[in-house]
Each structure stands twice: as structure tokens, then as C-alpha cells.
Amino acid sequence: MKNAIRILLLTALMVVSAAAVWAGPPLSGTWKSTNGDFDEGTATTKWAAGSFIGAGNTIYGRSAVGGVFTNDWTINCPTVVAVTPIVPIVGANGNAIYMFTYSGGYVTLGGPGNPWNGGDAVYTGTIDTYTELRTIQYVASKITGATSDHSVSAHIQGYNDACVAWAIGNGVLRGGSSPSLPLPFLYPTLQSVKGAGYPDYPGAGCVLGPNGPGHWEDIRDLTVSITGCAVATEPTTWGGVKSMYRK
């Protein structure tokens, strides 16, 4: 019986080890969602102090197609640490531009089915930099729309230090759960109810929940680049697994 148990254990380890041997770093290259290389998506931001423009707001984004989430990519809860006015609004009508600087959080890239797939089920990257350049349109002091240029870079975990992914994309404001103060949204130009194709609001510990306040947007026109990735920093050979069970 003892030998049978040991055989079963080693068989299971062989299966796990075989998967590990096949795992590998993401492939180097550049891909675009507009070429159909991977999915575009949506994002939701929770407001820390009830404001569309404020430090402490946290974003969560995920790839999606036709209102159904996919596993091509996620943006996991970086938080705004600074808001810098670039072009302030003058009067009640016009456009204003702000730069949002984020800190913390991580990104994930799904492996199978994606052009960067090197064998891992998912690649996790710690965010190094994240900035958003947001242009907001006002009519009679109400927000009628906003577009954003998102830029993020991250180190892929489990591989060499030079293994880096970075991405750019465009955000299009679709709506908010409540008026931001002191500049409310203009409804029904913007949505007042979040659709099913948008994530829940990110809370503490990046736990998603139904309660805002916050806003949601489409994430489009993405470009992802990956460079510098080599072999894993941890051994995954079958010989290493066998050495633990020789006694």
C-alpha cells in the first residue's frame, strides 16, 4: 500500500512538473487590439472622496468582448496619488486637461490564446509607472464627456529583472454612479447606471463590490509591448522534484 501511495504521489508530481517544464516567459513583441491581436475592455474607478477628479481614486480594468469579461488582461487597483492640472477650464464651458499619477497595483496578462504566450497560464506584473492624461468637457459647469490616454509599465514577476511589459490605451468615459462634486455629470448624455459589461467597484485589497460612488469607461486602442524576458528565476526541472522524494 505504501508503494502504491508513493507511485500515485510521484505520478501527480510528474504531471505538475511536466506543466512547469513547459512554462516559459512571455514572448517579446508588440501587439495591438485594433489588429485583433487581443481583446479591448472596460474599467471602473471608485472615488475615495466622491470626486471624479481626486487623489485616492482606484481603478480596475479588464478585457471584455460583447459585455463578457475575458482573461487577456487586467489592471488591478493602482490608486491615484497626484492630480496635476495641465489646462484648467476658464468659465462654465470648455475643456480641461489633468494628469493623474497612480501608484501600486499590478497587471496580469493571460497566457494561452494570446500572442505573447510562452507557456504560463498567466503573467503577473508589478506596476512601475502608471499615468493618465484626461481631457474633460464641460457645458454649463457639467461634465458631458471625457477621454483619457492611459500609459502603464510593469515588471513581469518570476523572470529576470529586464522582463518588462508596457502598454498604452484610450479611455472613454461612459457614466458615473452619482454626480461628482462640485462638477456633476450631465445625464442622460452620460450613463447613470453601470452596465453588466463593466467591472464592480474596486475596494480595499482590490476586492470588487457593487457599491460606488465612481465612474466607468471603455478601454480601447491598446498597444502592448514586451521585452527582455528570459528563463524563470526558480527551478522547474523534474530532477529537482525527484530529489525531494529520494529518502
Image (tube, rainbow, N blue to C red):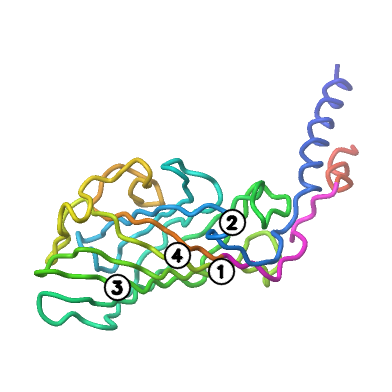
Label 4 – label 1 distance at C-alpha: 15 Å
Q: Residues under labels 3 and 4: Cα distance? A: 23 Å
> On the image, numbered disc 1 is attached to which residue?
166
Q: Nearer the viewer, mark 2 or mark 1?
A: 1
Q: Position of residue 12 (x, y in %)?
A: 79, 31
**Residue for point 62% across, 55% down:** 123
In this picture, which residue range is highlighted in magenta? 224-237
- Secondary structure, mark 2, is strand
| 11 displayed left or right of 187 | right
How far across and down, in percent of the image, does residue 110 sit?
60, 50
Mark 3 or mark 4: whose residue is earlier in sequence: 4
Disc 4 vs disc 1: which is toward the camera? 1
The residue shown at (26%, 58%) is: 47
- Which is the main secondary structure of the residues drawn in magenta? loop
Q: CA distance from mark 1 to mark 3?
A: 22 Å
Residue identifier under label 3:
135
Q: Residues within 10 Å of mark 1 (few under 14, many from 20)?
A: many
**N-term-proximal mark, 1 vs 3:** 3
| Kind of residue at disc 2 | Thr
Disc with the residue nearer the chain's start (3 vs 2): 2
Q: Residues within 10 Å of mark 4 (few under 14, many from 20)?
A: some
Secondary structure at badge 4 equals: loop
Q: Which residue is mark 4?
A: 104
Asked whether disc 4 touches disc 1, contact meaning CB atoms under 8 Å apart, the reply is no
